[in-house]
Image: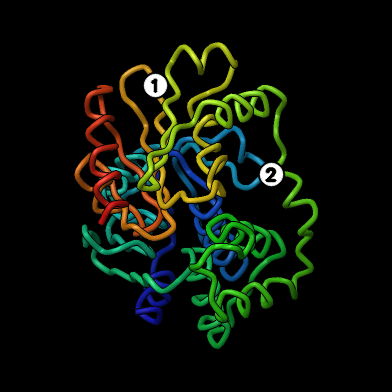
Amino acid sequence: MKEQILDAIEAYETIIIHRHVRPDPDALGSQGGLAELIRTSFPSKKVLTVGEEEPSLMFLNKMDDISDDMYENALVIVCDTANQPRISDNRYRNGKLLIKIDHHPNEDPYGDLLWVDTASSSVSEMIVDLYLTAKARGYNLSHQGAFLLYAGIVGDTGRFMFSNTTQRTFSYAGELMKFEVDTGALYNELYKTEQHIARLNGYVLQHFEASQNGAGWMKITKDIVASYGVSASEASQLVNTFSNVTGLKAWVFFIEEEDQIRVRLRSKGPVVNTIAAKYNGGGHPMAAGATVYTWEEADAVLVDLEKACTE
C-alpha cells in the first residue's frame, strides 16, 4: 500500500492534504509533515494543506486558502481521520483520487486507497514509515518536515509516556532526530499555558467528580468558559488534568459550546471508543471523542462510562 501511495503521489501534479476537525499535534504534524516530504522531493508539484486553523497550534502548520477549481484532477489525501464527518473541509470528495492514511480503527473505510495501521502510535509515525520506504525512490525530508512529524508523535504519545509508544516509535523518533529537531523549542510551544487556562485548570482540579467504580467526569458549561475567558478548544486541552488521581479508571470531559457539547473520553483500561461511537464520535479504545447536544445526553454518556468501569 505504501508503494501504491507513492505511485499516486508521483502521478499527480496537484496534491491537497486534509485532516480532522479540531486538529491536534498529530493531525497537523502528519498533514504538514507529509506536505513537506512531497514538496522537498518534488519542488515543481503544487502541494496544499487545508482545514480550519487551531490558534494554539499555529506554530506548527498554517493552512492554505484554495479555490474549488484546485480540486480538479487533484490527488486528495486525508490524514488522521477515522470517519468522514470529522474531515475538515468537505471538498475532500472533489478530487480525482482519494487516499485515507489513519491509525484509528477502520470503521469507515472511505477512499480509493486506504492505509490504516492501528499498531502505529500516530499517523505522524506512519508518515515517517512512508518516508523511509520512499528514500529508495530518492525522496527527501526537510528539517521542517522532521519537526512536524516529531511534534505529531510527541502529541499522540504524550511525550512517549502513553501505552501506544513502541520500540518502532522510538526508532522513528530517532530517525527524525537526525535532522536536529529542537525538542526544547517544540515542548515550550506545545506545553506553554496562558494564565487564564492555568486558572481554569485549578477550577477543574477543585470541581471534577469521580465514582467509587473509577469513572471520573468534569462538566465545563458555557458560563464557566466565558467566566475564565477561554475558548472551548482551550478548555478541552485540560482533559488529562485529573488523570493521575488514584483509583481512576476512565474519565470524560464535557465542554459546552453554542450549539453542542464536546465530549472527550480517556481511559486506563475500559474501552471508550465504543461509547463515543454511540454519540456521533469515535477514536481509539483508550482515547476518543464525541458530540452530544443536551446535558441529558451527557448524563447518558456518564451512565455508559460507569458501566464500562464496573465491568
* Residue 18 visible here: no
Q: Nearer the viewer, residue 165 or 133?
A: 165
Q: Image quarter for residue 182?
A: bottom right
| Residue located at (21% from left, 62% from top) | 109
Amino acid on which disc 2 is placed: Tyr
Drawn side of residue 141 relative to residue 87, left or right: right
Within-10-Å neighbours for mark 1: few <14, some 14–19, many 20+: some
- Labels 2 and 1: the sequence-earlier one: 2
Q: Image quarter for residue 253?
A: top left
| Residue located at (46% from left, 49% from top) | 248
| Residue located at (22% from left, 34% from top) | 300
| Disc 2/disc 1 C-alpha distance (Å) | 24 Å
| Residue located at (24% from left, 48% from top) | 307
Residue 4 has which mark? none
Residue 191 has which mark? 2
The residue indicated by pointer 1 is: 257
In this rendering, the answer to whether 81 lies above or below 120 is above
Amino acid on which disc 1 is placed: Glu
- Identify the image quadrant of the N terminus: bottom left
Q: Secondary structure at mark 1?
A: loop
